Image: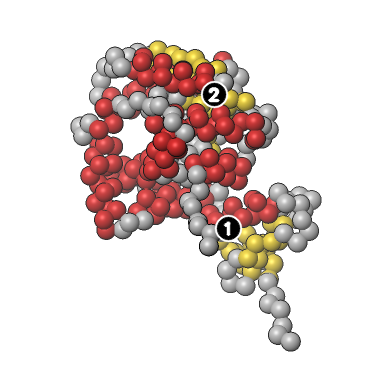
């Protein structure tokens, strides 16, 4: 009797890059690495996939100058980058004093990463946001009164931003690190409950998980649905409109790459989407059930 195992982090990232991010061969990616568990796992997985998927990879770390341990954490990241054959560079920034330290540090970090991306001539910037981060961000936006547009957060790819781990859970990340013996550092600020995100992570999410064990998935599905609403995820046939869920959109993308004459995806209400093998476009048509003989 065969045993079913959940997909590995490598498998999840492979699917995300191929089916949702549509990474083209020859693309140059800069991956942001801090030395923490999430970014170290991302660096390791991308290094393993670059030959298979045909992209180039460089790594970059940012020292915010806020903790003396940060330089040693970037040293750890640099050692692993060297181990997996990825060029690594770093930038030191100064975070100006004022309120909302995390927001100001984030702004300084992305400014430095975008400068490094330009210097390295990288098309895409990959960050290590995963599904738990995304769920936390949705909750933070809700607490701050955001509407639908504000809740459509952390897409797998938005412009030149890439989030290859967004379909993985934090547990998938930690399992990969353990399985492949990847060292990482822990930032104590990630446990400091003076920050609202930490309280959401350590207080609100566990409580919601008791009430609804699938809450992280539900919050990610909400973000997906709101992102999809901006992209008009529906097909039309005359006055008929059929909405597409995330799974159906992924199936359509996969079918469009097959180049088969009869590639199709079943939809609701007796409809199906048929793929034009020449153009890759989907057309909504009535599905005829075979007659019983």
Q: Mark 2 Cα within 10 Å, few/some/many (few <14, many 20+)?
A: some
Residue 20 seen by the camera: no
Residue nearest the observer in this picture, 287 or 14: 14
Q: Position of residue 242 (x, y in %)?
A: 58, 64
Q: Is residue 157 left or right of residue 286?
A: left
The quadrant holding residue 84 is: top right
Q: Position of residue 238 (x, y in %)?
A: 67, 66
Q: Is residue 270 left or right of residue 140?
A: right
Residue drawn where x is 58% and y is 25% of the image: 57
Q: Residue furthest front?
A: 1
Residue drawn where x is 36% and y is 56% of the image: 214
On screen, residue 228 above or below 197: below
Q: Mark 1 Cα within 10 Å, few/some/many (few <14, many 20+)?
A: some
* Separation of residues labelled 2 and 1 (CA atoms): 36 Å
Q: Position of residue 241 (x, y in %)?
A: 59, 64
* Residue located beneath label 1 in the image: 248
Residue nearest the observer in this picture, 140 or 187: 187
Q: Residue furthest bottom?
A: 293
Tag shown at residue 84: 2
Q: Are marks 2 and 1 in contact (CB under 8 Å)?
A: no
Q: Is residue 206 left or right of residue 111?
A: left
Q: Position of residue 135 (x, y in %)?
A: 37, 45
On screen, residue 282 above or below 193: below
Residue drawn where x is 31% and y is 58% of the image: 212
SS class of the residue under badge 2?
loop
Q: Is residue 133 left or right of residue 283?
A: left
Q: Residue furthest left?
A: 194
């Amino acid at each position: 009797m065969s045993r079913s195992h959940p997909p590995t982090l490598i498998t999840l990232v492979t699917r995300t890059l191929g089916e949702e991010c549509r990474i083209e061969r020859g693309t140059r990616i800069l991956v942001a690495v801090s030395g923490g568990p999430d970014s170290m796992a991302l660096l390791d997985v991308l290094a393993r996939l670059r030959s298979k998927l045909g992209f180039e990879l460089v790594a970059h770390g940012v020292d915010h100058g806020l903790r003396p341990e940060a330089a040693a954490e970037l040293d750890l990241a640099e050692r692993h980058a060297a181990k997996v054959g990825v060029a690594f560079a770093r930038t030191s920034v100064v975070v100006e004093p004022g309120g909302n330290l995390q927001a100001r540090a984030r702004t300084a970090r992305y400014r430095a990463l975008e400068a490094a991306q330009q210097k390295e001539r990288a098309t895409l910037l990959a960050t290590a946001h995963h599904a738990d981060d995304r769920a936390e961000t949705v909750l933070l936006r809700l607490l701050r009164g955001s509407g639908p547009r504000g809740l459509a957060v952390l897409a797998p790819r938005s412009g030149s931003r890439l989030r290859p781990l967004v379909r993985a859970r934090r547990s998938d990340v930690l399992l990969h690190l353990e399985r492949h013996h990847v060292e990482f550092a822990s930032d104590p600020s990630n446990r400091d409950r003076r920050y609202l995100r930490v309280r959401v992570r350590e207080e609100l999410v566990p409580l919601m998980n008791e009430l609804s064990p699938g809450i992280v998935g539900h919050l990610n599905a909400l973000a997906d649905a709101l992102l999809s609403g901006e992209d008009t995820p529906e097909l039309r046939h005359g006055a008929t409109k059929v909405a597409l869920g995330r799974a159906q959109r992924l199936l359509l993308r996969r079918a469009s790459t097959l180049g088969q004459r009869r590639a199709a995806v079943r939809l609701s209400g007796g409809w199906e989407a048929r793929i034009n093998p020449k153009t890759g476009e989907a057309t909504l048509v009535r599905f005829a059930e075979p007659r019983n003989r």
